[in-house]
């Protein structure tokens, strides 16, 4: 599923910011898409923590080869040894098991997610073991397709902003937030294009 707002977002970003407009023109071949599977998206986000996009994809591919189905019950029942063979650390395995339990026991108000504000949803998701704000923000961008998420703690986003807007000089959160004001209410879209400027493969979860 592709966001209905994508065309208007890229149009407004191009008008408001020439640098962003150049990035949008350069990477206009692919757009953000949701895979439509909340559990799998959160699982991929956990797997992607603190490793490169390439490494995360490698682990994920091993996982889907070994595990017949990426579902809460199956992941919960898969042995630690098998999950370790995929390249998962003991800590990430415990996170995936806790995530599975949250879905299996209905601790998450999934039916209410669409009506919840960004911060309320982030607060609920961060109650899950191993899911911090960054992981929750990835979920809001890639599964919920929320248009105005700005993950300032993301290293890739920091690098891209430094490269394109600050001559590769060091930046801080204040710099990023000030720049992000130009992109409201489409900061998720701006973030996605900045990620793409660093990696020819679209970021996906």
Image: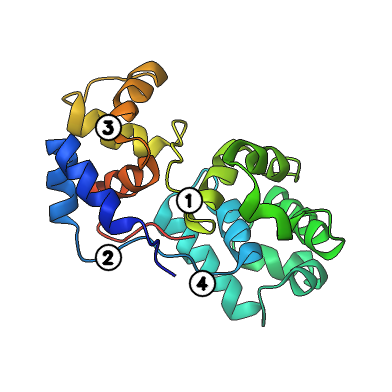
Secondary structure under the numbered disc 3 in the rendered image: helix
Spot occupied by residue 182 in the image (x, y as percentages of width and height): 28, 30
Closer to viewer: mark 4 or mark 1: 1
The residue indicated by pointer 4 is 61
Contact between labelled residues 3 and 1, with CB atoms less than 8 Å apart: no
Spot occupied by residue 197 in the image (x, y as percentages of width and height): 23, 48
- Left or right of 64? Residue 102 is right
Q: Distance between the residues labelled 2 and 3?
A: 21 Å
Q: Residues within 10 Å of mark 3 (few under 14, many from 20)?
A: many
Would you place residue 112 above or below residue 151 in this image? below
Q: How far apart are marks 1 and 3 (CA)?
A: 18 Å
Q: Earlier in the sequence, mark 1 or mark 3?
A: 1
The residue indicated by pointer 1 is 141
The residue indicated by pointer 3 is 161
Contact between labelled residues 1 and 4, with CB atoms less than 8 Å apart: no
User: Of residues 124 and 163, which is closer to you in this image?
Assistant: 124
The residue indicated by pointer 2 is 30
Q: Which of marks 4 and 3 is nearer the N terminus?
A: 4
Image quadrant where residue 125 sits? top right
Contact between labelled residues 3 and 2, with CB atoms less than 8 Å apart: no
Contact between labelled residues 2 and 1, with CB atoms less than 8 Å apart: no
Spot occupied by residue 56 in the image (x, y as percentages of width and height): 49, 58
Contact between labelled residues 3 and 4, with CB atoms less than 8 Å apart: no
Secondary structure under the numbered disc 2 in the rendered image: loop
Secondary structure under the numbered disc 1 in the rendered image: helix
- Left or right of 80? Residue 141 is left
């Amino acid at each position: 599923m592709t966001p209905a707002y994508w065309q208007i977002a890229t149009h407004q970003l191009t008008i408001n910011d020439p640098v962003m407009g150049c990035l949008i023109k350069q990477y206009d071949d692919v757009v953000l898409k949701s895979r439509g599977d909340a559990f799998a998206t959160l699982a991929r986000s956990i797997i992607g923590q603190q490793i490169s996009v390439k490494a995360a994809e490698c682990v994920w591919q091993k996982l889907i080869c070994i595990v017949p189905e990426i579902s809460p019950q199956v992941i919960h029942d898969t042995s630690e040894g098998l999950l370790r063979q995929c390249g998962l650390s003991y800590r990430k395995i415990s996170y995936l098991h806790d995530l599975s339990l949250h879905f299996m026991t209905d601790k998450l108000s999934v039916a209410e997610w669409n009506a919840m504000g960004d911060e309320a949803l982030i607060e609920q998701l961060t109650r899950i073991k191993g899911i911090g704000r960054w992981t929750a923000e990835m979920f809001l961008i890639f599964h919920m397709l929320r248009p105005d998420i700005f993950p300032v703690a993301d290293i890739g986003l920091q690098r891209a902003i430094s490269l394109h807007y600050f001559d590769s000089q060091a930046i801080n959160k204040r710099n990023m937030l000030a720049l992000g004001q130009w992109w409201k209410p489409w900061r998720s879209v701006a973030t996605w294009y900045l990620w793409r400027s660093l990696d020819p493969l679209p970021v996906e979860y």
